[in-house]
Amino acid sequence: MTSPQRRPHHWVIGDVHGCADALEQLLLKLPAGDRLIFCGDAINRGPGIAASMERIWGLVESGRAVWLRGNHEQDLINGLQSVNWQAERRLAGCDTYRQLGDSRSRQWLERLQHLPLAYWGEGWVATHAGFDPSTWQPDLRVRLDFWQNYDGRFGDVVIGHTPGPHVRRLHHIVMVDTGACYGGDLSAYCPETQAVIAVPGLRAEQASPMPGFRGRSPEPAAALG
């Protein structure tokens, strides 16, 4: 008698931020049949932005992954849509725009515009930063207001946006950004099993500086207990 095949699980992946090598290493560790939810901010900061975008988009087109919009994707959308000097100045400071160039960046605009804001699972939801407590709509920049006021109405909310040294839980909120671009890990969290899989992100000499970030933890799952 054959054992029943389990339903595919989901893995919510924290902010990739152009860490293409870490992304490839993480994909090698994740079960091939499971669904991947990229929690936004796949772009900017790291050295492999174009490669990260192409890899993630290929997974989206294959039906295996969902790429959620983060505030960095939204900022690039806003810059590419605007036609004033302020937008041009923001684009000039955008890592993605510098690495891809104007033409390639604009080729991505329609795709980025259609990135969803949230992915709803059974008893959980993934979104980039959280929900605005005044409307309970996804908010790409919210932090403390959501952390202090979320009442569990959607079940667990799995978010990126705010890096820390390991995947950690705050009541019904699970934070999966472990600072890959700052010398931390790139992490994936399974809402069905609460398992964590992590790989090292950028080496210290490659990483973007972030005051107060403590780097990777030797036991990334410990904070979930």
Image (spheres, helix red, strand yellow):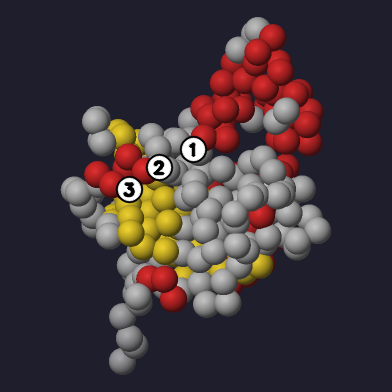
109 left or right, relative to 99:
left
- Which badge, 1 or 2, is on the more N-terminal residue? 1
Residue 143 image label: 2
Q: Residue furthest front?
A: 212
Distance between mark 1 and mark 2 Cα atoms: 16 Å
For label 3, the residue is 147
Q: Is residue 2 left or right of residue 220?
A: left
Place residue 187 in its image quadrant: bottom right
Residue 86: x, y in percent? 65, 13
Q: Nearer the viewer, residue 74 or 67?
A: 74
- Of residues 111 and 16, the one nearer the viewer is 16
- Cα–Cα span, label 3 and label 2: 6 Å
Q: Is residue 93 above or below residue 116?
A: above
The residue at 78%/36% (across/down) is 99
- Do the numbered discs 1 and 2 sit on residues whose CB atoms are within 8 Å? no
**Residue at 64% in and 8% down:** 83
Q: Is residue 194 visible?
A: yes
Q: Residue beneath label 1, please? A: 69
- Furthest residue in direction bottom, as rendered: 1
Question: SS for tag 3?
Answer: helix
| Residue at horizontal 31 percent and vertical 92 percent from the top | 1
| Secondary element at tag 2 | loop
The answer to whether mark 3 and mark 2 are in CB contact below 8 A is yes
Identity, as a three-letter code, of the amino acid under mark 2: Arg
Q: Is residue 30 visible?
A: no
Between 224 and 24, the one nearer to me in the picture: 224
